[in-house]
Image (spheres, rainbow, N blue to C red):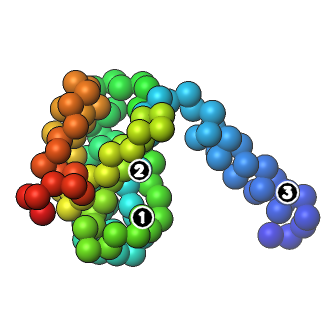
Amino acid sequence: MKSLAELQAIRDKARAQVGLRAESGASVRVQVGMATCGIAAGARPVLNAFVEEVAKRGLQDIMVTQTGCIGICQYEPVVEVIEGDKKTTYVKMTAEKAVRVVNDHLVNGNVVTEYTIGSNAQ
C-alpha cells in the first residue's frame, strides 16, 4: 500500500463483498467450520463437496459459506444448515455425507438425522 486511497479502495472492495453475501437473498445458508481444527479434520473436502453439489444441481436459493470455529471441535468437520431461525448441525462430516445432505435435506427437505449432533450414531 502506498497511499490512503489504496487502503480505502481495499476497504470498499471488502465491504462490497460482505454486502453481497448479506444481501444474497438465499433462504438457506450452509456454513462449514473452517477453523484450524475443522481443516485438520477434513473440512476442506466437505466444503468443496457442498459447493460442487449445489452448483451441479443449480440450487440458486442456497448459499454455501465457511465460518470459523463453531466450538465443538471433537465433532469436526461440523456443518450448520440455517433455514430462517432453524439450525441443523451436522457433525463428523465427509464429502460423501455432504452429497447426501444436499440430496436429502437441501433438495427434499428431510434432515439426515444420523449425521446430526443429537444422533446416537456418533
* Position in image of residue 84 (x %, y %): 48, 34
Of labels 1 and 2, the one closer to you? 1
The location of residue 120, given as percent across then percent down, is 11, 58
**Residue underneath mark 3:** 8
Question: In the rendered structure, which disc, 1 or 2, sits on the residue that comes first in sequence?
Answer: 2
- Amino acid type of disc 1? Ile
Question: Callout 1: 10 Å neighbours few (<14), some, many (20+)?
Answer: many
* Residue 102 x/y as whole percent: 24, 36
- Count of numbered marks: 3
Location of residue 72 with respect to 9 vertically, above or below: below
3 and 2 marks in contact (CB < 8 Å): no
Q: Which residue, as the protein is rendered here, is positioned at the far left?
A: 121
Comes first in the chain, label 3 or label 1: 3
Q: Quadrant of residue 109?
A: top left
Q: Residue at x 24, y 57 (%)?
A: 117
Disc 2 target residue: 31
**Residue at 70% in and 52% down:** 14
51 or 93: which is nearer to us? 93
Compute the Cα span from label 3 to label 1.
Answer: 31 Å
20 sits to left or right of 58: right
**Residue position marked by numbered label 1 in the rendering:** 70
Q: CA distance from mark 3 to mark 2?
A: 29 Å
Q: Which SS class for mark 1? A: loop
Identify residue type, mark 3: Gln
Label pair 1/2, CB-CB below 8 angstroms = yes
Type of amino acid under label 2: Gln
> Which quarter of the image is occupied by the N terminus?
bottom right
